[in-house]
Image (spheres, coloured by chain):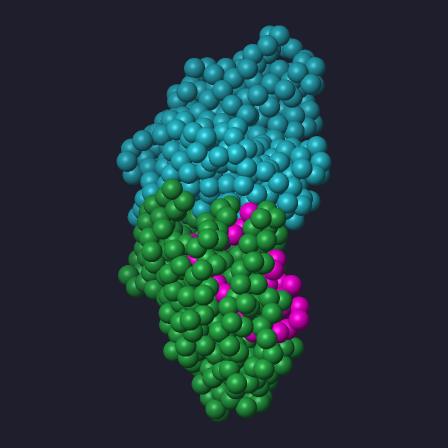
Chain colours: A cyan, B green
Amino acid sequence: MTVTAAQGFTAAGIAAGIKANGNPDLALVVNNGPRLAAAGVFTSNRVKAAPVLWSEQVLRGSVVSAVVLNSGGANACTGPKGFQDTHATAEKVAAALNAHGPGGEHHAGEHNAGEIAVASTGLIGVLLPMDKLLPGIDTAVAALSADGGEDAAIAIKTTDTVHKTAAVTQDGWTVGGMAKGAGMLAPGLATMLVVLTTDADVDGATLDRALRSATRTTFDRVDSDGCMSTNDTVLLLASGASGRVPEYEAFAEAVRTVCDDLARQLIGDAEGASKDIRIEVVGALTEGDAVEVGRSIARNNLLKCAIHGEDPNWGRVLSAIGTTRAAFDPDRLNVAINGVWVCKNGSVGEDRDLVSMKDREVRITADLATGSESAVIWANDLTAEYVHENSAYSS
Amino acid sequence: MTVTAAQGFTAAGIAAGIKANGNPDLALVVNNGPRLAAAGVFTSNRVKAAPVLWSEQVLRGSVVSAVVLNSGGANACTGPKGFQDTHATAEKVAAALNAHGPGGEHHAGEHNAGEIAVASTGLIGVLLPMDKLLPGIDTAVAALSADGGEDAAIAIKTTDTVHKTAAVTQDGWTVGGMAKGAGMLAPGLATMLVVLTTDADVDGATLDRALRSATRTTFDRVDSDGCMSTNDTVLLLASGASGRVPEYEAFAEAVRTVCDDLARQLIGDAEGASKDIRIEVVGALTEGDAVEVGRSIARNNLLKCAIHGEDPNWGRVLSAIGTTRAAFDPDRLNVAINGVWVCKNGSVGEDRDLVSMKDREVRITADLATGSESAVIWANDLTAEYVHENSAYSS
């Protein structure tokens, strides 16, 4: 059910002392081959963390032999020193893995830093404690195991209350993965920290195509709090260890299923949230219109508060739609909340007292009545707990 | 200090029973001339309330003899019936004023509905109780007085805790005004309900020019909660009663001063807010870039929570800047909080512990280090009280 569900991977998660509270904070995922194919998508925030800048370069080669991830510090907005620290981390991982012996019998070559991806999460604007992180890498390498995926998923948590893993197996090959993310959760291209692995025998270009296709309709359609991270990273590594070469469609669907599962887990564990909101925009002229409208609804603080209060305040949905550039006629808009069409033709529809909002999941359907395209965006409500958690995060 | 500070205007504010709690909910402002010049700006939300659609038509003629405003219901998303109700309201005001006698000795002509502006505020998606509103108009007409501006300002309050008025007098002429607004406070063009009056002898085109110039850098740069209203209306009426014809620049500056004063009062009374945040973006290539960056910072929920917690979490400022299309180099960004440059060249700057955030007003300066343009956006923090107030508003 995680990054070691696929053959050819070992992983570890340990406490290096980066977090003051002593919780696990360093994860390592190693691809033991025979293939070392990889693809990645990263935040579209123009302020990018040092590990994102580093890993983007690594992924240009479509070869990744290991991923090192730390929680307890984002290493974002840390200047040249922060980038040097990321570089040093990759060098240390390569050296430790080489000292430990090759990652597996299929991996004859030595590890080198240019094939080590790095990901970090935590507070922005603080340098990482390298005196703790670097020795932690030795500890993590010594702990590597084919059962280490769970520990790795635990070590990348920040404000997550649970660790997130998923896997799909079919026809002798597997796609598995892990994710972290609970706040600053509104990806522009990819999101959060996610590592996916597969033992299917797939090349880098195919991985890239399947990954971009999957993230576009899963992680990219999560908008918990409207805040785009500086550190979003999604990696997909293939070991080829199953010896199976899947059909592209079946493989892409498996990647999509794992991404969808992890994305849904992220929403379910969002900071302070009491509701998961599924916003489906239908009747749009284009898919882009549907996404723009869905995201505008997802980011409307007044609506998020109303949903927290179990108040089917559909006027706030219309006021959010009205701020977009999507094609629609205000007098033809329809809105349903949990299946009750409380707004018809831009005006009062069915009785709002028919809407029950007791369950954690709330479904909003916005019908633009203009075309036949649609999209689903997932969001959360806005709560006093979110305010509390995020007013004290860095203190 | 309000809409009756200028000569030539009478006003009233009464309780018509639109609000269930019996508070004042109907305001009337009458221009007794000799001039009946007017200008208006309205929400750019594409979902517009019936009174906005009505008043936009009225203002095309640049003549307004009276403005009727109600709280207790926005009359937005109410379909054809809602528009008929607005029309009936204007007709009733004209008839009641004509029955009452001409508004003043200078106003020989009869009132007609096409010169009556209507504004509404309150819950979206509910029809107004016309059986209470229409008789209330008779009561308001009977209560009209040259001292009625204060009552009018009180009657347009919704979640406002205080009523908002302002006035500037110079060279024998006055610009005064009133405003309401505490939530759904992020204008796209104008904002909230605002009525400004002047006894200067100014024509409609000049009023329009001065009003658009003023709102562009005052109400349009308020972004309390990122939610654009369906009902935003700002009107400026001129009676000419002072007989003075001011220089354009002096007049425009007076209008801007009154708008700025009222806009600042709106931020100071925003729902649940504990901080007023002045975001100044400097070093921008264009003013548009400065506004886009300022608004992105203003709408970042994580930053708004941090400021509530008096936490100088500048990383959240950078993550917000990074989502914009403005011209900047991430490695040259500088951010100050209350004068302390906590971020220099995109990285760690002065010690964040030097920042004191005890006062209600918090100043953020974001230097894009690219050009010489700037803009100021006003925002509020995000609090548990905001969540509470808006999770129970329509129930």
Q: At 55% from the left edge and 33% from the top edge, which residue is drawn?
A: A341
Residue B107 placement (x, y as % from top left): 56, 81
Q: At 40% from the left edge and 71% from the top edge, which residue is drawn?
A: B143
Of residues B372 and B117, which is closer to you in this image?
A: B117
Of residues B151 and B313, which is closer to you in this image?
A: B151
Decide: is B214 above or below B383. below
Q: At 57% from the left edge and 43% from the top edge, which residue is drawn?
A: A347
In-image side of A127 versus A105 (left or right):
left
The residue lying furthest to the front in this view is B99
The residue lying furthest to the top in this view is A171
Report whether residue B220 is seen: no
Residue B242 placement (x, y as % from top left): 51, 89
Provide the residue span drawn in magenta: B53-78
Q: Please check the rendered image and state whether residue B57 is part of the magenta-colored stretch, yes or no.
A: yes
Residue A263 placement (x, y as % from top left): 51, 29
Q: Please check the rendered image and state whether residue A339 is part of the magenta-colored stretch, yes or no.
A: no
